[in-house]
Image (cartoon, grey):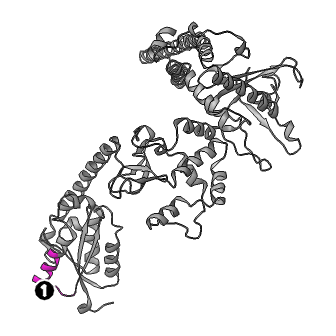
Amino acid sequence: MASQIDKYTILYGRLSQEDARMGDSNSILNQRSLLEKYARDNGFENALFLADDGYSGTNFDRPSWKKVIDMIENGEVETLIVKDLSRLGREYLQVGYYTEIYFPQKGVRFIAVNDAVDSLVASSTDFNPIRNWANELHAKDTSKKVRAIKRMQAERGERYGGKAPYGYKKRTADSKEIVPDEETAPIVKYIFELCAGGKGPSQIARILSNEQVLTPAHYYYRKYGKGQAGMDMQRPYGWSSTSVGHILANQTYLSHTHLQKSSTISYKNKTRVDIPENEQVIVKNTHEPLITQELWDIVRDVHAHKRRPPKHMDEPNMFAGLVFCADCGKPMVLYRTESIKRSQFHLKCYTYGKKGKNFCTPHQIRETDLEQVVLDDLRRITHFARMKEHQFAAYINAKNSAELRQEINALQKELDTMQRRNDELTALFKRIYEDNVLGRITNEQFRRLSADYNAEQKTLEEAIPAKQERLNKLKASAANVEAFIEKAKRFKTIDKLTPELLRLFIERIEIGERAKKYSHSAAQDIRIVYRDIGMVDSNMEKEEQPVHLVAPPRDIDELVKMLA
């Protein structure tokens, strides 16, 4: 332990970012000048100035403050002087603990100059609890204001992150505006294209590592000379599935600014927690995109249906989430085992596989056969769309006008019935509640009836939004034949079926049962539903479709009126 003459007079200063915005009166330089003058004028010797710049008063995990505590524990401090109590901190209980319990126990004299507090003068500390409470209220109020400002900035699409996301760079060093980085933007697109092609995050990470692509952290370090915590300097190409996953989930690459994704629990507890999705802020079209919405949607679809392939299989199931039983509507499951040849891999109805022949039939089809059927049909449809645009557009518009009208009417009728039943259940529940209160039905009858009504209403409330979303999509999208033709033009030759092509062109494939069950040669109905245009008849090219038969609607409102 240090002798009395060797002990320090600690002059402690603290400045938070919020304090700094209020002007220079609380600056570290100002605090140091005031404290050093006070020490000289009042005969305090062996003074040592320590400060924490940029730390909140509610956070006591500060470097210099921890050093002060260590020195006190070692018996090296005689006096601690601060400008005012708020410089010590703004957490009511913690500041009270230090001033009322800890400092007296350790024999440390405490002085807050501007508050006229000196622990040697008992009466000077009488108002400390009130001062500490007021300081904490200030911290709470400041926190609310900062959160409100951050929210407004987010809603305006203003970025407040330190560095640009991987694939972008700041337009200038001091700018918040981001532009594509010529070196890394192509890598971001490459990652999305690999995923659209059926590769998972782990596979993509291995590809990038093998091709010696610098990780985001190492690229940033080599370009700007700034590292980050936990960066492995020995593995500059050590991509992880987590890094790839974050890139694939980042809406920044669509040109959107996604903010307010996480926050601290409170002004006291700085632990970060995720903000619910409906409270997050997404501002669209704030900068140049690196990928198209189309590619983003394909990646989302691949991710939603991707399953890890068996260890003995290199390639995942490209049909995952696309192929369904035409009778029961359940997915078709791909069967692959080491005991059968690649040519014998086949898809089978999920219901039949799980429940047996009393619930559905196999609907079995070989994977290679399905690939060939889909490839041939895709070639046929895209070739016709490219070569005879006007005839193709007229045919699709004529076909979809009738089909769409029928589906919209059926869906609207179903939705109206569900909504009426939901309203009826609400009225019924009110009625049985009143009957129970008036003694017309027993508590047991009320419990049983209310449970049934609540269960039915819960089912309806879950189903209605899905039905409404489907109806809105039908009304809004209709047959976007122009979009399909543009995609067809981009792929003039289709040599092989890929997961990307499947999800770009096809929405759903339905497998019917063979004309003769369990026969490998009997005819089998395969219905392919294309994105933007729906199902297309096999004899489409044979039908003469004059362009003037169906005039495409000028806008969505006109289409909806036409279909009503």
Q: Nearer the viewer, residue 228 or 463?
A: 228
Residue on which the image places disc 1: 43
Q: Can residue 330 be seen by looking at this rendering? A: no
Give the residue at x 61% y 44%. Answer: 193
Give the residue at x 42% y 18%. Answer: 437
- Helix, strand or loop at disc 1? loop
Magenta highlight range? 33-46
Q: Nearer the viewer, residue 179 or 19?
A: 179
Q: Can residue 331 be seen by looking at this rendering? A: yes
Number of labels in the image equals: 1
Give the residue at x 58% y 45%. Answer: 192
What predominant SS class does the magenta segment belong to? helix
| Residue 496, picture quadrant | top right
Tell me: 478 left or right of 525: left
Residue type for callout 1: Gly
x and y percentages locating residue 545 in the rendered image: 64, 10
